[in-house]
Every structure is written in structure tokens, then in C-alpha cells.
Image: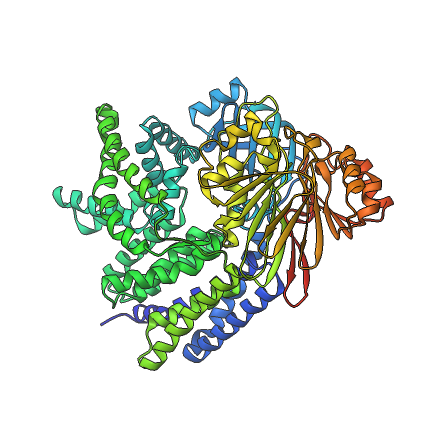
Amino acid sequence: MKSLNHISFYNFKNGQLFLLALILAIESIALFLATNIWQVLVSIFFIAYLLFVFYFKFKEAFLTILCILLVFFLWGSYRKNISEYKKIDSPIKVYPDKLSHSENLYFGCAKYKNSNLYISINSNQQFIEKFKKGIPFWIKVDDSKINSLMPNTVPGQFNLKKWGLCREIKQQIQIKHFTIVNRKPSIYDLFYWIRYKIKEYLSKMPRLLSFFSHELILAENPDKVNNKDILNSYRNLGVIHLLSISGLHVSLYTMIISKFCSIIKRTARECFILCTVILFVELFLSAFQPGFFRATLTFLLSSFFKSKKIPLSLLDILSLVFIFHLFLQPSLLLNVGAILSYLLVVAIIATKKYSMIMQNIFVNLAILPILLHYFFQMNILTIIFNFLIVPIFNFVLLPITFINLVTFAIIPKLSFLFEMMMQIITKVIETVARAKIGIIIFGQINWWQTILLLILTFILIIQPKMILLKLRIYYWLSLGYLLFFILIHFPLYSQVAFIDVGQGDSILITTPLNRKCYLIDVGGKVNFGKKGNSGISQTEKILLPFLYSQGINKIDGIFLSHQDADHVGNLRDLLSCIRVKKIYFGDGLLDNNSFKRRIAGKVAHTKLINLLAGNLVQEANIKFHILYPFEKSVGKNEDSLSLMFNLSGDNWIFTGDLDRAGEVKIINNFNIKADYIKLGHHGSRTATDPKYLRQIRPKLAIISSGRNNRFGHPHAETLKTLNECKIPYLNTQDNGTIIFRHYLWNKKTIKTCFNKGRL
């Protein structure tokens, strides 16, 4: 006979835990993810509805649940309000295993008082010596600059502020001068030293072995630049989950440990203790990666409840793990990996009654709304690629990786054989991925569309018994995806978007309905005597995420103003990633050797068109009138291609980096007016002639300039000219990406993606 405690424990948990986990998840979303009042109100509605359900199903536990929700709200609010510091007056604790470096610049997470900080530090010899020992150490900051973490200023771009909030980091510190502080290491520092030494050991391996070992042991990428093709390939094929430590690896560890314990004839209890110790060590090594945390605790709790003969369902065990995880890290759902990890397992549990093929289809459908919201693309052949690649990964790549962990220390030459095998498999995967077979750039669905599709998908998975109702859900789900796809790819508005590419220009123009897409310049970075940056390009960080978020996978035309890197520097990368039908530029630019090198080998299927003042570029629903240059030139600032077009009744003028003399020449030759203009040369005093402004009389001017740029753009003289002419302005420096939209029903909107001073 079961004890009363045993029975009450089971009765309290059965079914209630899943509802509680769901309510807490929505509460966490309202606390950390909601960005407007509508999202908060929708969260409150769902919480109220689920509480209503809870009350009628589990009335006896209702007050307890309300108390838990209140405690979580207070705890989450407290954890959300991370301390911010105006100055650093105490030593900072530096963890070598959490730092990366490029030459003498070290950057990563550190500890200050009770807060986490993101630091970047120009090292000296003493710092490097301390770092190489791998033991956490302290530094006293003598001179530093403190900034709040920036949110994304371009839609679709990586959000550094959310990344930091998930890790309870609000500030980054650029440390200029410091001194090492001698303090005795604590016993806990031993674990960080072990992690550093493992990291050091793995870094000595050949590249692919090092990559897979780092990903599967430490849950980190050792070289984001050289390994980006591997990550992109796995992501494009829909098998990126293989590179995350999760249930697969927990199963592998426990299977090996169980086999070992069986050989040495250990009891089940001793085997469980050994599994627990090893899994917790790996949890620390993986920096508590959410997927591995979930899988580890689910395994341990399942084993514990099974040993105690407590018949708790797998869904309730998962819910218990999630609740614990959420209290441990209230901002957990800022991590998209955590969302996918838990959602994936819920979908697997809910579809266990189906065949393997149907289960795979439903599981992929369950996570698809999240993928479209965060990554904007899907691969319709994901299920096929999983069937092909998962066995290769499980039975070839994974065993090689783990065997090499041991053999590399004993027979290092064997690693080169393993590396060759890795290279062959990786080459095949990258070749297939590069063909982009099955990939659809869907575009970003918004938050309410994501919720709607998730609800419909899980109703479908539950499979109502009535055939007619089931068919209706299939119909509404299919209609939802089709409708959202049409709204993204056949928009009901025209658009002009000034993309925040820093100190540079890039403007996207799109027409309504049968959308055509054009770019004026593509941005780029200028290196003033510095070594070229081999990091992730601006194209990958800014342009592609923005274009993909709008469902854009081809450009109908690019207008290049002139040869400077801050206008055309990203062109080569962009041509490698996206199809461009035509490139327009001032006559003579094609004779420029620097420009020819930028496009060499990338324009076989792209039409190149020279332009001069007076030319007309006639495209579908839009005409581009060329205002400058008047004669063949080499593409300097003063030769900038300048143009005007009318979109949905508004006149726009763009002049690149054209100087005042060029502006005056334009108004002397053309009788033009404009509603909106982009100021020449990022607001420099060399452009924006008062005579030019008075003739064209714009309603609004836009300046594209970088934050803290070395030129001081926009110049005070330019702003004074705007004020004297009573012309308001917006600046990407202060406002981030600036998006103008004109809807078919004559509604106009101006959206800015960032407001200076309000992070």
C-alpha cells in the first residue's frame, strides 16, 4: 500500500504541472519579451483563461498556484532590474574560459560585485600570462568606458540587448588601463580552470575535430569566422539541432556509463549516482546550455520517480524541469534555443502515437512558427535531410569526435585520418546546403501570427475525433501560412528604408503588391590603415537579416553612387548571397580597377548599366530619373550618381556623397521638388547647399551616419542650415533604421528602430 505522502505527491502533480508551466511561460514572456501594451494584454488574457481552466479542474490547488505565480512575478521583476554602474570602483573578476581574443583584444563575460558584465580589454604581457594559466583572476580598472548594451537597430538583426538580458548583463565596458590584483583563488575557481584546460586541449585539434568537440562538450563555437560555413550548412538543411548538446548526448553518456557499470558489476543505484555526477560535470562544462540542462534533469527525475514507483507522466516531469529552470533563470525564454528545446520535446510527447514519418512532420510543424519568427526561412525538405544526415552524424561524426577525445592525447597522428573523414562528410553537406535545395525565404511572421499558428498546430496534433473538425483545422492552418506568405511577399504598401549600416549608405526601395526591390548603395566598412577585418561581414550581420526578414531573396536593381567602401564595400558579399538582376552606376565607374575587383566573378548573370544625367530608368511601377553625373567620371565623391523617383505620390532625391557644387549644378539643370531627401555625404559640411534646399523644399531630410564616427558627421554647419531652412530631419545615428511606408489606402507611417537615450 502506498503512503499518504506518496499518493498526495502524485495527485498534486498529475496534469497540474503542465498547466502551471504554461502559465509561468506566458508570465515570463510578459515580463521579458513583451514590447508593447498589446503583447501584455494578450499575455494577461491567456493567463486569465488558463487560470480559469485550472480553477475548474484543480480547485483545491488554486490558491497555491496563485502564490507561485505571484512569487515568480516578484522574483522575475527583481532579476530583470539588473544593477547598472556609472563607474567601476572595485576589482573585476576575469574568467579565462569565458574570454575570446583577437590579437591583443580580449572580450567576454566577467563578474563585478554581484553583476555580470561584458568586457573588452587591450591586454598587456602580465594579463596574457594570467590568462594562459586558466585560473580566474582579478583586475583593478584604472580607465574605462561604460556603455549599455545596444538593442538591434535593424529589423532582423541580432539583438545584443536581449542576449545580455538573458545572461543578466546590461553593460559592456571597454577597459583601457588596468592593474592585476593578487587574490587567492577560491575552491570554485578550480572548475573554471578545468574548463579552460579542456578548451585549450580541444583547440589544439585539427579544425573540424576541434569544432565538433567544442560544440558537443563545451557548447560553444571556437572560431565563428572559419566555422560559419558549417553552421550555415546545418542551419539551411534544418539539422542544426545536431550541433546542440541535448537528449541525444544524455542518452549516449548514460548508455556508456550503464555499460561500464554492467561490466564492473555495479548496482543500479551506484550507476545512477555515477550518471548524476558525470552529467552535472558536463552541465558545468557546457555552461548550463538549456537543451542539455533540460535533458539532464528530465533523465534524472525520470530515473528518480521510477525508482520510487511514482507514476508521473513524461509531460509532467518535463513541466517540473521547466518550472525549476524558469525560477533559476526567469529570462530563459529570451533564449530561442531554450524555446525550441522545450517545444520540440512537448511536440514529440504529443505525437508519440503517430508513425515515425507523421511524427517528424508534426514535430517540424510545431517548431516552424518559432523558426519563421526568429530566422525567417524554412526548408521544405528538412525531414528528408534529417533522415539522411542524422544516421551519418550519430554513427560516424559523433563516434569519431568522442574517440578522438582520447586518442588525440595518445596518438595525435590518428587525428589527421579522422579529420580527413570529417572533411569529406562536411564537404558533401556544405555542397548540398550551398545549392539551397528546398529553402524558402518566407520572411518574419510577427508575434500574433506566431501565436495563432502555434495554437492551430497543437490543436491539429491533438487530433480531434470529428473528421470534419480535423479537416477544418488543416484548412485554417494552411490558409494561415498562405495568407501570411502573401502579405509578406505581396505587400500592401510601398517602402523606403534607410538601413542603419553605421557610417555608410544603404537604402531599400520596394513597390507594393507585385513587389520589386531596389537598393541604393550597400554600405560597408572603411579600414583606415588597419588590417582587414576577417570577422563576420556587415552583409551577414545587417543586410541579409533585414532583407530575409522581409522575405526578399532577390534584388531587381542596385544603384551604386560611387566607389567608396562605405557605399559599395558590401557589394561582393551581397552578390555571393543573393541574386541581383541589374547594377546601375555612373558612367566610367566600370573603368575603376578597385570597383572591377569588387565584382570580379560575381556578375555573370547580372546586367551592368552605365548612367548619366538625363537618363531614365523605367522599371515596373517606378521611374528613376538620373540627375548626376553629367559626364564620364571615375566614381569619386564629387561624381556621385544622384537620382530622383516618385513612389506612391512622394518625390525622393538621393545624392550619395555629392558636394555642394554638384548640388548647385543639379538645380541649375533640373526644375525639381522633393518631399524627402537624403542629405549628401552623411551630413558633412561639404554638401547640403542652402540654395539646393530652398529650391527642392523637402518636408523631411534623412541623414545616414554612424555612431561616434571619426568625422563628426553630421556637422554642426549642416544642422544649422537645416534649421535655417526649417527642415526637420532624422538620423540613423540617433534613430537606427528609418522605414517609410505608404499603404494602398493612403495611410503613411514612419518607423524608427532605435531612439538615442532610450535603450
Q: Position of residue 419 (x, y in %)?
A: 26, 30
Q: Quadrant of residue 526?
A: top right
Left-right relation of 624 to 9: right
Is residue 483 visible to us here?
yes
467 above or below 613?
Answer: below
Q: Nearer the viewer, residue 428 or 372?
A: 428
Left-right relation of 628 to 253: right
Q: For the point 19% across and 47% down, which residue is it?
A: 258
Q: Position of residue 343 (x, y in %)?
A: 39, 59
Q: Position of residue 164 (x, y in %)?
A: 54, 45
Q: Nearer the viewer, residue 195 or 422?
A: 422
Q: Residue furthest top?
A: 125
Q: Quadrant of residue 515?
A: bottom right
Q: Nearer the viewer, residue 440 or 630?
A: 630
Is residue 166 visible to us here?
no
Q: Position of residue 713 (x, y in %)?
A: 73, 35
Left-right relation of 492 to 343: right
Name the image quarter holding the N terminus.
Answer: bottom left
Q: For the point 24% across and 49% down, which residue is it?
A: 388
664 above or below 295?
Answer: above
Q: Quadrant of residue 612?
A: top right
Q: Nearer the viewer, residue 419 or 600?
A: 600
88 above or below 328?
Answer: above
